[in-house]
Amino acid sequence: MKILHQVVETVEGLEFLDKIAEPYAAVVGKVVKPRFLRNLLSGTYVGHPLHPVLTDLPIGAWSMAALLDIVGSEATEPAADLLVVAGIVLAVPTAASGANDWSDTQGKERRLGLVHALANSTAVSLYTASLIARKRGNRGVGKALGLAGFGVLMAGGYLGGHLAYSKGVNVNRTAWREGPAEWQAVLAEAELAEGNLRKVELDGVSVVLYRDGGQIHALDSVCSHMGGPLEEGTVSEGCVTCPWHGSTFRLSDGGIVRGPASNPQPVYEARVTDGGIEVRRSPDS
């Protein structure tokens, strides 16, 4: 396993990949800019990142195809071919959602994600060639190409797992942040100006406050998507937008208006008591 980690670290250090990754990420960012498409590919509508769910589909199809190619008989050949086709078709939305997520990364994660995408693209190419060979009657060649594609797919999957589980790419950055359930004083009321975002500390958790007329809103200051500082964001139409990737949350309940965030922002209750602002975790958050 140490060798695998060394390989990953080597890939992460390949700075020349930035020359490929940065312009490609910019193009992807422009393509997914429309709100509906961004929300769809990010998993905003389902409340969970979409890409990890979709990856199981082509991997599952191609895994079963590999099994049938190895231990199957002539009778199972049509099923193996159908699974190869299914994997190729399902790889398209999977790649689209992955590209959407990858466009928000930077540095080492972006380099590693690029290689991950190249590996998976190679796997798709090998399976496409495998399908063509099968249809032409060259089943031996088709099987060999399919198994080669499966090997490349596993390598790409390892890199994807490293990004998710070792680097924490696209995980909920507020999952372990939980403020106190009891009211705590955080700021004098006079220190919170109308229409300004203000970051305060609440029992080790940072919270952003916003005064809108007679109401004070309070949300976790760390964007659930990639950890962006919401106190540096912008407020419009009752929503705060993260300055990093544009995730937009309602101030009233932390709900997502625009992705790439797929997890709502934790919301806190705020009140004014004796000239001071007190905050506590919302029971519904």
Image (spheres, grey):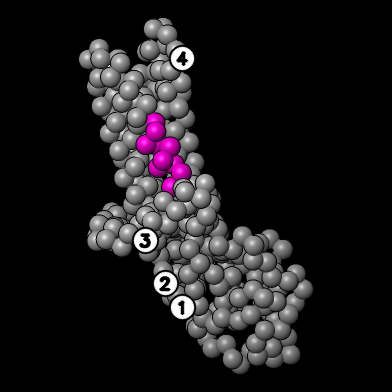
Q: Secondary structure at mark 3?
A: loop
Mark 4 or mark 1: whose residue is earlier in sequence: 4
Q: Is residue 67 left or right of residue 22?
A: right
**Pair 4/1: label in front:** 4
Mark 1 or mark 2: whose residue is earlier in sequence: 1
Residue 75 screen position, x and y as percent:
41, 7
Give neighbour class at mark 1: few <14, some 14-19, many 20+ (Cα, 10 Å): some
Q: CA distance from mark 2 to mark 3?
A: 27 Å
Q: Is residue 91 left or right of residue 191?
A: left
Look at mark 1 in the image and give the residue it sits on. 232
**Pair 4/3: label in front:** 3
Q: Amino acid at mark 1?
A: Glu
Main secondary structure type of the part rendered in magenta:
helix
Q: CA distance from mark 1 to mark 3?
A: 31 Å
Residue toward you, 223 or 63: 63
Mark 2 or mark 3: whose residue is earlier in sequence: 3
Whether the magenta-drawn stretch holds residue 159 is answered as: yes
Look at mark 3 in the image and give the residue it sits on. 13
Q: Quadrant of residue 62?
A: top left
* Discs 2, 4 touching: Cβ within 8 Å: no
* Discs 1, 2 touching: Cβ within 8 Å: yes
Give neighbour class at mark 3: few <14, some 14-19, many 20+ (Cα, 10 Å): few
Q: Which mark is residue 71?
A: 4
Residue depicted at x 48% and y 63%: 226
State the extent of the magenta-drawn residues as a range.
150-160
Residue 176 screen position, x and y as percent:
64, 62
Mark 2 or mark 4: whose residue is earlier in sequence: 4
Look at mark 2 in the image and give the residue it sits on. 243
Q: Which mark is residue 25?
A: none
Q: Amino acid at mark 2?
A: Pro
Residue depicted at x 53% and y 52%: 165
